[in-house]
Amino acid sequence: MATKEFVRAEINGLRDEIHQKMGSLHAEMKQQGLLLKTLIGLAIFGLTLFNPAFVKLVELMMK
């Protein structure tokens, strides 16, 4: 039969494990968010750079 101390130790061990996994998931989510922002920025940059109206505007500004 399990003792109260044993059960508490198991619960505390599981709690610590959950906190560790949540911390790693949080770090991974931050990394994925940064990657997503970078990809969105590159997509906007690419769409703007190759937009004929934007190219024309740049040409007019350079004259």
Image (cartoon, rainbow, N blue to C red):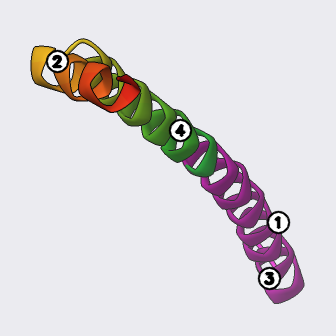
Disc 1 and disc 3 in contact, CB within 8 angstroms: no
Residue type at tag 1: Gly
Is label 3 in a helix, a strand or a loop?
A: helix
Badge number at residue 36: none
Left or right, 34 with reference to 9: left
Decide: few, some or many residues near mark 3? Use Cα within 10 Å; few <14, some 14-19, many ≥20: few
Q: CA distance from mark 4 to mark 1?
A: 29 Å
> Which residue carries the number 1 mark?
13
> Which residue carries the number 3 mark?
8
Residue type at tag 4: Gln
Is label 2 in a helix, a strand or a loop?
A: loop
**Which residue is rendered at x = 36% and y = 34% of the image?**
40
> Which residue carries the number 2 mark?
51
Magenta span of residues: 1-29
Residue type at tag 2: Asn
Residue type at tag 3: Arg
Q: CA distance from mark 3 to mark 2?
A: 63 Å
The quarter of the picture where residue 60 lies is top left
Of labels 2 and 1, the one closer to you: 2
Q: CA distance from mark 3 to mark 4?
A: 36 Å
Decide: few, some or many residues near mark 4? Use Cα within 10 Å; few <14, some 14-19, many ≥20: few
- Among the two numbered marks 3 and 4 on one chain, the one whose residue lies closer to the N terminus: 3
Q: Which residue is nearer to you in this view: 39 or 12?
A: 39
Decide: few, some or many residues near mark 1? Use Cα within 10 Å; few <14, some 14-19, many ≥20: few
Left or right, 54 with reference to 38: left
